[in-house]
Structure formats: structure tokens, C-alpha cells
Image (cartoon, rainbow, N blue to C red):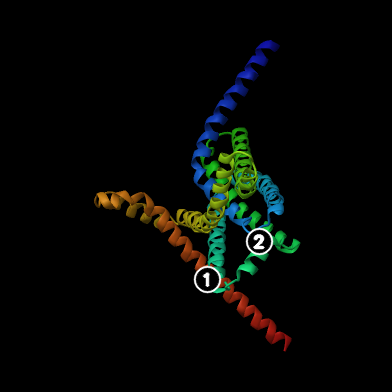
Amino acid sequence: MPAGSLLALLDDIATILDDVSILTKKAAAKTAGVLGDDLALNAQQVSGVVSNRELPVVWAVAKGSFVNKLILVPLALLISTFAPWAIVPLLMIGGLYLCFEGCEKLAHHFFHRREKSVEKTTEEITTPLSPETEATRIKGAVRTDFVLSAEIIAITLGIVAGQDFTRQLIVLSAISLVMTVGVYGLVAGIVKLDDAGLYLTQRPSKHAQRFGSAILWAAPFLMKTLSIAGTAAMFLVGGSIITHGIPWLHHTIEHIAEAAKHAGAAAAMFAGFIPPLLNGLCGLLAGTVVLLFVLGTKKLMGKSSAATSH
């Protein structure tokens, strides 16, 4: 009898692990797009950090990401059980925040940028950030990670919605761990490319030196590309969350994309780009509205404070 019970237990465990493996693969495939955006955004956050502080900053953000997951996984399970109606509104708030942050970056780039001399730029690159500035950048990265992590967990929760609590918990935990280790491992590798290139240029081998020189040449372009992709990802992800939360808007975008497929060979080639493009435009519009609201509120509060002080 004990042997039979043990075999039954092992069979149940094997069944659960098999189900978890299949569900985790499905969740990983569904969240791959968000993973790419997460990678771009976090690589962007450490751009401009001096070499000896890059890995500590990445590690600090990674720890914040683990804390985010420790908060979000139990919260997602609780909301799914007791208040499933709250998932979409909470995601839309997160989407609006991402779009607002993207518009804030664009506004700072276009309206508050000053021309810098080569000496000034070199000084900024080689001078360590102050502890306050570094802490602010880390907090911003962790806040952004929270929104993207919530999106990943929400997508995963939709996949495991029909499963029992144990399977939901294991799959959500597995995806959270894999995504966090994967994203921040890749970010750490990307930000240390220049150091790897410098190391290779100092090797005796001519091939290693050439490869190192190529890495050093390509690294700044890669970081710039990731910075641009990170800002674009804010609108793509945030806009997608917002449009999915407004059924008529989501269906309109799908209808436009479907119509393009039947509008001719030329239009059909670009049909796949229509949904992300329209999602991005919706994200840009939503972020602009939120940014104007925030700026207007700050201005009114500033005037109110000034009037009170007089």
C-alpha cells in the first residue's frame, strides 16, 4: 500500500511537471515580444553610466525586478481569484504610465536638450553619476520594470486561467524567474560589450584584435539603437495595453489590418505592421494627453503655492 501511494504521488508530480512545462513554453512564446521591449528599455536605463558602475546598476535594477515579481505574482493570483474585473483597469493604468514616460523622454530630448561640447560630453561619460542621480535612475528603471512585469504576468495568467492554483503558481513563478534572469543577464552582457572589445584588442592574436575593434566600433551604435528602441517600446507596449482595454478600438485596428491584407499585394506586405504602428500612435497620443495634464497640474499647483506664500 505505501509503495502504491508513493507511485501515485510520483505520477501526480510528473503530470503536474509535464503540464507546467507545456504551459511555461506557451507563456514564454506569448511574452517574447514584451521580453524584447523589456530588454531594450533596461539597456537604455544604464546607457551613459560609467564602466565601473554599469554592473552594480544592472544588479540593483535586477534585485528590484525580483521584488516586483514577489509582489506581482501573489497579487495576480489574488486578483484573479477575488477581483478578475480589476486586471484590465490596472494594466491600462500601467500602459498609460509607460506612454507618459515615453512622452516625457521625447519632450526632454526635443525641448530641453542643449548643445554640448566634445569636452563636456567626454566629462559626462567619464564622470561617475552622483549617488542621488544613480539612485533616481535605478528607481525609474524598477518602476518601468514593474509595468512590463505586470504585462508579462497578466499574459501568463491568461494562459493558465483554467488551471488549478498549484499549476498557476508554478508557471507564474517559473516565467518570472526565467524572464528576470534572461533580461538582466542579456543587459549585463550588452553594457559590458565595450570592455570585452577593449580586452580583445589587447590580445596577441590579430583576429582577436580585429574582432575587438569591430565590437568597440559597433557598441555605441548598439546602445543608441537600444535607447531609441526602448523609447519606441514604451509606446508600442503601452499603446497595445490601452487599445486591448478598449474593445471597439482594438477591433477597429484589427479590422484595418485585415482590410489591408485584401487590398492588394503591396498593402498585404505591410498588413502585419499596421497593428503595432496604430498601437504606437495611440500610445503616443495617450502619453501626450497625460503629460499635458501632469504639466498643467504642476503649473497650477505652482501658481497656487506662489499665491499662498504671498
Image check: 96 left or right of 169?
left
Q: Compared to 29, does 260 lie above or below?
A: below
Residue 132 pos. (x, y %): 74, 63
The front one of 227 and 180 is 227
Q: Is residue 87 visible?
A: no
Q: CA distance from mark 2 to mark 1?
A: 21 Å
Query: Looking at the rendering, which quadrant does residue 96 occupy?
Result: bottom right
Helix, strand or loop for disc 2: helix
Identify the residue shown where x is 55% and y is 54%: 91
Residue under numbered circle 1: 110
Query: Looking at the rendering, which quadrant does residue 200 occupy?
Result: top right
The front one of 60 and 23 is 60
Q: Amino acid at mark 2?
A: Ile
Q: Amino acid at mark 1?
A: Phe
Identify the residue shown where x is 41% and y is 57%: 277
Residue under numbered circle 2: 125
Residue 154 pos. (x, y %): 55, 46
Residue 249 pos. (x, y %): 40, 58
Q: Closer to the camera: disc 2 or disc 1? A: 2
Helix, strand or loop for disc 1: helix
Residue 226 pos. (x, y %): 54, 54
Quadrant where the C terminus is found in the figure: bottom right
Query: Looking at the rendering, which quadrant does residue 186 occupy?
Result: top right
